[in-house]
Image (spheres, rainbow, N blue to C red):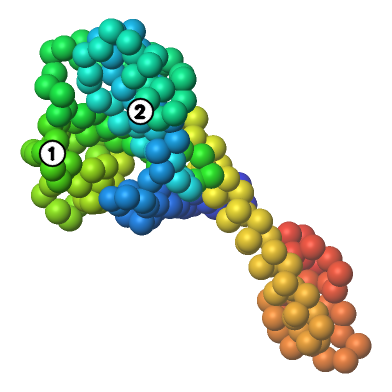
């Protein structure tokens, strides 16, 4: 009995993890396409600046970093997005963001996070873009697998399957899907037992009982007793 319960638990956890990947990848396939993400804010750091655009959609967050040389980052950010917000690009890309003056103005760094109900997987893209049509030229993709087209239309036209777990969201998503599986299984078992009882069958094995028969001759279960402790 214990071995069976352990096996069922492992199976449920495995399916929960698999569903986390599947849901994140489906979101990546269906939402990370050119023009599908909405810019919500633009932020910048001290001069010279990385201007950071944030794109959001259901289950998807994309951050785009663009290097600019300006002595007025606050004014620049306000003109770019209409929001007077200052934020360090390190918060979006980490300490290896680098000095913007070391990159051409056409250079872009992208960080994507995908998952539902929490962001579970991430990927990164960097490289120069061609202006126009604002598409990446030989981009470097890390923590992800590129599918489809060979070039990325800004911000994306090529499908990228993220691979790097965002552990907090990954564990929460996996636990959420595992709980849904458990609830669905309990509901299914309760429905099956109810339908069997109403049709005059044994709730445990489905054997058709005769009128006035309270003990199942097939499995020995007494009507109204739990299936975990059948009467011998």
Residue at 37% x, 25% y: name it: 79
For marks 2 and 1, give the CA distance: 18 Å
Which is more toward the observer, 231 or 209? Answer: 209
Count the marks: how many?
2
**Which of these two is toward me, 58 or 48?**
48
Q: Nearer the viewer, mark 2 or mark 1?
A: 2
Please determine whether, in this image, residue 128 is positioned above or below residue 103: below
Up the image or down, 196 lies above or below 175; here it is below
Q: Quadrant of residue 101?
A: top left
Vertical side of 178 occupied by 191: above or below: below
Residue at 31% from the left image edge and 22% from the top image edge: 51
Residue at 79%, 63% (x, y): give it: 226
Vertical placement of 67 versus 134: above or below? above
Of callouts 2 and 1, which one flags the residue occurring earlier in the amino acid sequence?
2
Q: Residue at x 25, y 25 (%)?
A: 66
Element at badge 1? loop
Q: Secondary structure at mark 2?
A: helix
Residue density around tag 1, few if under 14, some if 14–19, many if 20 or more, within 10 Å: few
Q: Are marks 2 and 1 in contact (CB under 8 Å)?
A: no
Quadrant containing the C terminus is bottom right
Nearer-the-camera pick, 129 or 79: 79
**Residue ID for mark 1:** 131
Left or right of 139 on screen, residue 24: right
**Residue 122 visible in this rendered orientation of the protein:** no
Q: Residue furthest bottom?
A: 211
Residue 229: x, y in percent? 77, 60
- Say left or right for 88 vs 98: right
| Residue on which disc 2 sits | 80
* Residue 216, horizontal then vertical, whole percent: 78, 79
From the top left corner, tell me how far across and down residue 180 is, in percent: 60, 53
């Amino acid at each position: 009995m214990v071995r069976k319960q352990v096996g069922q638990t492992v199976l449920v956890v495995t399916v929960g993890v698999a569903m986390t990947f599947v849901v994140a990848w489906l979101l990546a396939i269906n939402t990370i396409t050119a023009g599908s993400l909405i810019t919500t804010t633009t932020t910048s750091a001290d001069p010279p600046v990385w201007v950071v655009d944030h794109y959001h959609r259901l289950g998807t967050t994309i951050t785009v970093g663009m290097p600019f040389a300006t002595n007025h980052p606050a004014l620049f950010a306000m003109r770019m997005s209409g929001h007077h917000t200052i934020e360090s690009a390190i918060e979006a890309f980490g300490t290896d963001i680098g000095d913007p003056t070391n990159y051409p103005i056409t250079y872009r760094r992208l960080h994507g996070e995908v998952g539902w109900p929490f962001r579970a997987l991430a990927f990164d893209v960097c490289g120069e873009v061609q202006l126009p049509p604002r598409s990446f030229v030989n981009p470097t993709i890390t923590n992800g697998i590129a599918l489809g087209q060979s070039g990325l239309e800004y911000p994306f036209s090529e499908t990228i399957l993220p691979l790097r777990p965002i552990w907090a969201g990954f564990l929460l998503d996996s636990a959420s899907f595992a709980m849904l599986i458990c609830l669905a299984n309990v509901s299914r078992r309760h429905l099956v037992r109810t339908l069997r009882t109403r049709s005059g069958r044994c709730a445990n094995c489905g054997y058709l009982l005769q009128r006035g028969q309270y003990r199942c001759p097939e499995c020995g279960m007494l009507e109204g007793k739990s299936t975990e402790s059948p009467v011998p």
